[in-house]
Amino acid sequence: MTNIERHAYDVVVIGAGGAGLRAAIEARLAGMKTAVISKSLFGKAHTVMAEGGAAAAMGNRNARDNWMVHFRDTMRGGKFLNNFRMAELHAKEAPDRIWELETYGALFDRTPDGKISQRNFGGHEYPRLAHVGDRTGLELIRTLQQKIVSLQQEDYAETGDYDSRLRVFAETTITEIFVQDGRVAGCFGYYRESGDFVHFDAPSIVLATGGVGKSYKVTSNSWEYTGDGHALALRTGATLINMEFLQFHPTGMVWPPSVKGILVTESVRGDGGVLKNTSGKRFMFDYVPDVFRKQYAETEEEADRWYDDPDNNRRPPELLPRDEVARAINSEVKEGRGTEAGGVLLDIASRLPAEQVRKRLPSMYHQFKELADVDITKQPMEVGPTCHYVMGGVEVDADTAEAAVPGLFAAGEVSGGMHGSNRLGGNSLSDLLVFGKRAGEFAAKFAQANPRIRVKAGDIEAAVETALAPLTRGDAGENPYTLHADLQAVMGDLVGIIRRQGELEESLTKLAELKERVKKVGVGGGRRYNPGWHLALDLRNMVIVSECTAKAALEREESRGGHTREDHPGMSSKWRQVNLVCSYDGEDVHLTHKPVPTMRRELLELFEVSELSKYMTDEELAELAEGGAE
Ligand SMILES: Cc1cc2nc3c(=O)[nH]c(=O)nc-3n(C[C@H](O)[C@H](O)[C@H](O)COP(=O)(O)OP(=O)(O)OC[C@H]3O[C@@H](n4cnc5c(N)ncnc54)[C@H](O)[C@@H]3O)c2cc1C
């Protein structure tokens, strides 16, 4: 019989990025015995890579900023498909979450008068991103870890055991969540180093596993982003929404090939960097869509004046939301005005003195110097779109972060709804703080009200069998690395930044083949640190999540945010009313249409009717007018 280490907790948090750590802190503060589990080393989560900052309407740089402006910007960025309640809570609570981080010991950059500094970012009307140079995620993770350690020290003082109430399980991958009596009962996984199995009985589980980018070849995401939380949720009977919406960040490195996809932070543009094609033209002025025309400058002179006088000038078009900039770069390259490596030029060298570039963008300076031998204080960077963020995710209740299965919660990038069809830069770090806290709080409440159930031995045995299957097949099975490359080719070539009906249909045929091949994946060697085995298990998740994206992308016949259909180029107000919901029957993904929740009236009134008319149907506008003109 296989040896399995068994634990019992009140709350188990899967994921130790910003969302997971914030949730774990909250659950422990509520007195719950909490485990936090991380596939990677503790501290190496994706959050650590975040560069630009966390968006929160603190009004430190411009006193006109407030939650209503932030809410408006977020809804505009998401093209009105956002779960409005999530966007509202996020805008209202983000400042408190940032100030709270200071009480945990975070050291943000400062304004001359000593407040937390805030920088400009695409789609944000005012400077709003609290930051630490271009290494904000590092400080965020450092601070949250420090808080965890301080809580463990308190527990040690009381119980003599650091892990008595809050324990970290690093380099531990969860492969299964168990549901019993209609609610969550526990989860199962393996230690990456030893390959030994571990099981947790727990009434509440928080998914905080991040995104899905590793299904794409050109991506800013790290090896961890294999959609595990998305797939775990589906397999427990929970649902995903908005999976067709993937953010292709406009500026990833395009050269040299070995580093293709690595992120070039939007802060470069926020701090004055401009995009040019190979003829030297600042091309973004040609790509301002009608819905944004009023807010963006029409000439280079006005755009340049905005940096010093934002109240009397309109923003540079380089700071349009990411989907717009990514599509513009894609068009320039396609029309032959890109570089040989398939990118365009991002110039900060001619815009800021060298010492300012090094001070404000130290990571970018080193990244280009070390990886591409380019000195960005002297030369432009070569950049192009890279798969960066998934807007889609676990369908949750906005206030409690609870998924469709009782006891299952989700926060951070793995959850869906908050960002609609496109996320604004900086809104992820604030999202994971706001909803990480909420998920921890409500997971704790659920655990208080629902006793632990002991997972049935048969369910655990089945999980062991599934985990061991690739090793049992051995080298005779399908090679996981080949399968991964094939999956990335399908997703990159057929479900990429610009989508077409025929290609999406082809992707589904190919994904069905891949799904069968993944069932036959095999690896040699044993359980002790075996990356081939780890990938074999991850593929099971990637292939289901990719099916969700491809099916939803085929279904949605319009272009909106992170979903561009060449054959349906415009936004459709009918489609704005629809969320595509994915469920899973153990074999196939199924799609259903669900109405997008209707925004409360006082929130609708934050927008001019002329703006709403760009998004809403005539019936919706008539209804709004009937309610009385305000
Ligand atoms: C280069 C880069 C720069 C960015 N810059 C910004 C920025 O400036 N501002 C901003 O708002 N956003 C930024 N983002 C986006 C943002 O960093 C992420 O969306 C966010 O950090 C996600 O946080 P999270 O807590 O949801 O997930 P993560 O921080 O990725 O954490 C996921 C955790 O889940 C664990 N995990 C995954 N699967 C399993 C499993 N099966 N079992 C156990 N553990 C598992 C991982 O090990 C990890 O601990 C950036 C992203 C990148 C890639």
Image: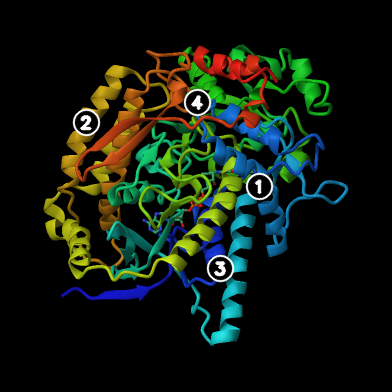
> Which of pointers 1 and 2 indicates the residue nearer the eye?
1
Is residue 367 visible to us here?
yes
> Which of pointers 4 and 2 indicates the residue nearer the eye?
4
> Which of pointers 4 and 1 indicates the residue nearer the eye?
1
Please provide percent x and percent y for residue 133. Answer: 70, 47
Q: Earlier in the sequence, mark 4 or mark 1?
A: 1
Contact, mark 1 vs mark 2 (Cβ under 8 Å): no
Kindly identify the amino acid type of the residue bearing the numbered disc 1. Answer: Ala
Model colouring: rainbow
Identify the residue at horizontal 51%, vertical 36% (top origin).
Answer: 83
Q: Is residue 5 above or below residue 417?
A: below
Task: Describe the element under mark 1 as helix, strand or loop.
Answer: helix
Determine whether, in the image, residue 447 is placed left or right of residue 228.
right
Q: Earlier in the sequence, mark 3 or mark 4?
A: 3
Kindly identify the amino acid type of the residue bearing the numbered disc 3. Answer: Ala
Q: Is residue 265 above or below residue 526?
A: above
Task: Describe the element under mark 2 as helix, strand or loop.
Answer: helix
- Which residue matches tag 1? 94
CA separation in Å, label 4 and label 1: 23 Å
Please provide percent x and percent y for residue 316. Answer: 70, 22
> Which of pointers 1 and 3 indicates the residue nearer the eye?
3
Label 4: few (<14), some (14–19) or many (≥20) C-alpha neighbours in 10 Å: many
- Which residue matches tag 2? 510
- Quarter of the figure with the C terminus: top right
CA separation in Å, label 4 and label 2: 26 Å
Q: Mark on residue 561?
A: 4
Q: Residue furthest bottom?
A: 160
- Which residue matches tag 3? 30
The one of 626 and 599 positioned closer to us in this rendering = 626
